[in-house]
Amino acid sequence: MKKTVIAALLFVAGCGFAAASPIDSTAVSGSVVDEVVWVVGDEPILRSDIEQMRLQAAQEGVRFKGNPDCAIPEQIAVQKLFLHQAAIDSIEVTESEIASGIDQQIEYWIQMAGSREKLEEYKRQTVSQMRVQLHDDFRDRQMVQKMREKLVEDVKVTPAEVRRYFKDLPQDSLPFVPTEVEVQIITQTPRVGMEEINRVKDELREYTDRVTKGETSFATLARLYSEDPGTARNGGELGYTGRSVLDQNFATVAFGLTDPKKVSKIVESEFGYHIIQLIDKRGDKVNVRHILRKPIVSDEAISQAIVRLDSIGDDLRARKFTFEEAAAYVSDDKDTRNNHGLMANTSESGRTSKFQMQDLPQDVARVVDTLQVGQVSQAFQMTNERGKTVCAIVKLKNRTEGHKATVTEDFQILKNVVLNKLREEKIRKWLTEKIKATYVRINGDYRDCDFEYHGWVR
């Protein structure tokens, strides 16, 4: 429900690799007698922790700077420092955020393995067991990421600093900008019949009756039946959430609830149909459980939407009207309709109309890759960011081939290079000071290491 962007491959701070491997990293070859080899603050680092990271890195083909026997425990120790500070600063990660990250990780594993069944066979675990096993690790990863973001939130860079940084930089040191595209899109949502909508509503009414009669709990039904993967595992709980990040219809009902024992009326949102149960209110935030059910779109409805869009595409190619006009009057996509159909790429560095191909939705990228500039595609089916089936046509508005960055054409990219450099410098300075101020005890096997950060050995 939250309007957040979650990367498909998860960040592991400082380790140089993105997502855990589907290969079982719990079975370390040989017999290792576990022991505490480092202590950072009051957090121990076990020899088995180091061996597990070593095995995972080997499976991912990751190479560490310097001796892995020294680099691996140091990277774990760095994460302990971030986690320690996150606890001091009361950094919070909601169960919804953790569940969402785990869902993306498991989906990545399923794609690599070929199917859910093959993944479970390979890991010798059910997906549910994997979720439990991943929970604490993902919580820690996200807390580390939030702590890093907090440490650098006040780092700014001026245009003069950007120009000054790149003024005397050798040509071969300039970053390479991959091919970027600008894409316009028109979508049509296939119509769902009343019979299907009534079926979904009847299911939700049945859930409400069962909770009201005391036959089962709302949380149990959410785990069994909710189609919101980010919250179903946690009994449908969203965590404390502000009104602005929720769907408007959903927020109106959620913030209007007063009795935790009652279940709301059925609510239609941009994601589907919900019932909601209040858990608690705290200031301007509310914590609720919900069950989401999505009507199934029929093949006939999809075919009809495809036909309508192909007819619009034919008219566009015949120049009966412009793509911008069609987007304004025909498109169901509210995010692009008022922007002449132009898709927007939102990231930490801001909002732009330019996408690298890997940043486009997969279904869109596959079609755009076949188009020439100015060409309108045939209609195709896709799943939008809200998880709904839609049909679309796209136009390749512009393509900028890969090139060496220049200040005049790629200022935002170069600004990000300088900004990231300043952020990393601040992180390094913080770590250096944090190491000096934190109790550290290191096993003698590691005292002769050439560490990246000074101050570990005293």
Image (spheres, rainbow, N blue to C red):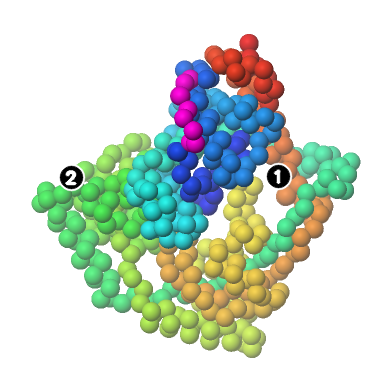
Q: Is residue 400 magenta?
A: no
- Please give left or right for residue 91 compared with residue 170 in the image: left
- Which residue bears the numbered disc 1? 416
Residue at position x 71%, y 74% in the image: 373
Q: Nearer the viewer, residue 205 or 242?
A: 205
- The C terminus - image quarter: top right
- Please give left or right for residue 46 compared with residue 162 in the image: left
Residue at position x 43%, y 69% in the image: 389
Gap in Å between the C-alphas at discs 1 and 2?
50 Å
* Majority SS type along the magenta span: loop
Sequence-first tag of 1 and 2: 2
Q: Quadrant of residue 145 in the image? A: top right
Residue at position x 53%, y 79% in the image: 379
Residue at position x 56%, y 35% in the image: 54
| Three-letter amino acid code of the residue under disc 1 | Asn
Please, what secondary structure does the residue beneath circle 2 have?
loop
Please, what secondary structure does the residue beneath circle 1 have?
helix
Residue 239 at what x, y percent from top left? 36, 42
> Badge 1 local density, few (<14 within 10 Å), some, or many (20+)?
some
Residue 42 at what x, y percent from top left? 47, 17
Q: Which of 208 and 255 is in front in this view?
A: 208
> Badge 2 local density, few (<14 within 10 Å), some, or many (20+)?
few
Q: Quadrant of residue 130 in the image? A: top left
Magenta-drawn segment: 28-36
| Three-letter amino acid code of the residue under disc 2 | Lys
Q: Residue 305 carries which label?
A: none
Q: Is residue 29 magenta?
A: yes
- Please give left or right for residue 155 compared with residue 216 in the image: right
Is residue 401 shown above or below 21? below
Residue 21 at what x, y percent from top left? 51, 47
Q: Which mark is residue 261?
A: 2
Q: Quadrant of residue 338 in the image? A: bottom right
